[in-house]
Image (cartoon, rainbow, N blue to C red):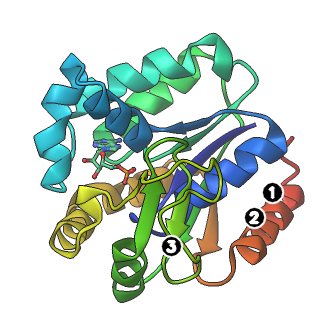
Amino acid sequence: MHLILFGPPGAGKGTQAKILSEKFNIPHISTGDMLREAVANQTELGKKAKAIMEAGQLVPDDIMIGIVRETLKSNKCKNGFILDGFPRTVEQAKALDDLFQEMNINDVVILDFNLDEEEIIKRVTNRRQCRNCGSLFNLLYDKIDNVCPVCGSIGTIYQRDDDKEEVIRKRISVYKQATLPVKNYYKSQNACFISIDGYGEIDQITNTILEKLEKIKVH
Ligand code: AMP
C-alpha cells in the first residue's frame, strides 16, 4: 500500500499516519519528523533546516526531494509506506511522480484532510509532543502532566516552536500559497484522491479512512 497524507498542518495527518502504519505494518514517513530529528542531532541538514522551520517556511525542494528519494528507495519501504508532509509544493509532487514511475509504483492513494483555519489554530497551539518517543498529545483532549503516558519519560513533553500561534499562522499562509496548488496538480493528473473530514474523534476518522480504502480495494 502506498499512501500520501495531504492537508494543512494540524489536520490530523500525523495521528492517523501512526495508526495506519501499525495497522498495515508499513512505515510512517514524516518529513517533518525527519527534519526535527536532524535538528536535534545537529546534522548538516538540521543546521540548514532549523531557522527555516522556526519561521514556518518550507525547506528547499531539492533538499526535500533528495531525502524522500533516498528513504522511499530504502529497504524499509519495500512493502509500502505512508507519506506524511510530502509533497508540499508542485515541484515536489512532480519529482515524486517521476520517482513512482522509476519504482513502478502505480497504486498511490492520496488522503486529503480538510479542516478550517480557526480549528487548526486551536488544535495546533494545544499540541504537545514527547521528545523521547515522539508521541503526540493534545491538551484539549489528553490529561498531560510531567510524565509521558506512552513511554514514561519525565520532563520530555514539550511544545514545538513551530506550533506557537504566530508561527502556525505563517505555516497556514505558506500552505495556502505553496501547498494547495498541489491539489489541483493531482486532480489534473487524475490521481486517486480521497477527501477526509478532519473533524471528529480520532477513531471515527480512522474508521472512515478504512471504509474509504476498502471501497477502492487498496491492499
Ligand atoms: P510538519 O511536521 O510536517 O508540519 O513539518 C514541520 C516543518 O518541517 C514544516 O513547517 C517545514 O518547515 C518543514 N517541512 C516538512 N516537510 C517539508 C516538505 N515536504 N517541504 C518543505 N519543508 C518541509
Q: Quadrant of the C terminus?
A: top right
- Give the residue at x 40% y 65%: 8
Amino acid type, residue under disc 2 in the picture: Ile
Check mark 1 vs ligand 1: CB closer than 8 Å? yes or no: no
- Residue 175 in the image: state x and y as whole percent: 28, 62
Q: Nearer the viewer, mark 1 or mark 3?
A: 3
**Residue that mark 2 sits on:** 209
Disc 1: which residue = 213
Q: Residue furthest bottom?
A: 118
Q: Which mark is residue 138?
A: 3
Which tag, 2 or 3, sits closer to the chain's start?
A: 3
Please give left or right for residue 127 compared with residue 110 in the image.
left
**Residue type, label 1:** Leu
Inspect this view and state whether residue 181 appears: yes
Mark 2: which secondary structure? helix
SS category of the residue bearing label 3: strand
**On screen, 38 above or below 195?**
above
Q: Measured along the vertical axis of the image, is residue 88 above or below residue 125?
A: above
Cβ at disc 2 under 8 Å from ligand 1: no
